[in-house]
Image (cartoon, grey):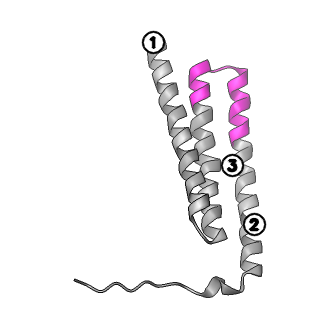
Amino acid sequence: MEWVRLTVSAVLLLLGILVFISAAIGVNKFKRALNRIHAAALGDTLGILFMILGLVVWKGINFASFKLLLVVLFFWLASPVAGHMISRLEVMTDEDLGEIEVEHHEDL
């Protein structure tokens, strides 16, 4: 039974690492601040959830795992508020936000 718990924990931790890596790539790849905020928000919520669930599965249900789940709850409450405030600032200060770039491709 210990091997199953270790395997599930390792899979959850690896999923969390992959989400964090993809969020970091998204933050560096996108040009607009609103797109970067979206990529960073995924890393905050989904990455933290997978990492902490992996730790909870690894160590079992105890008081420390309850505190870890409270950390997830705090991130889920604080991250949307911070993202909203940053995106609101971007919308208020960017004059070119209304411009949409369209690429035209000719059919072969």
Relative to the observer, which residue lies in front, 24 or 65?
24
The percent coordinates of residue 4 (x first, y second) are 44, 18
Pointer 1 local density, CA inside 10 Å: few below 14, some 14–19, many at least 20: few
Residue 58 in the image: x percent, y percent?
57, 21
Tell whether label 2 touches label 1 (CB within 8 Å). Answer: no
Magenta segment: 54-72
Question: Which mark lies nearer to you, 1 or 2?
Answer: 2
- The question of residue 69 being in magenta is answered with yes
Q: Pointer 1: what residue?
A: 1
Q: Residue at x 59, y 87 (%)?
A: 99
Three-letter code, disc 2: Ile
Q: Secondary structure at mark 3?
A: helix
108 to the left or right of 24: left
Q: Amino acid at mark 1?
A: Met
Residue underneath mark 3: 76
Tell me the SS state at disc 2.
helix
**Is residue 58 positioned above or below 49 on the image?**
above
Disc 2 marks which residue?
Answer: 86
Queried whether the magenta region covers residue 73, the answer comes back as: no
**Residue 60 visible from this viewpoint:** no
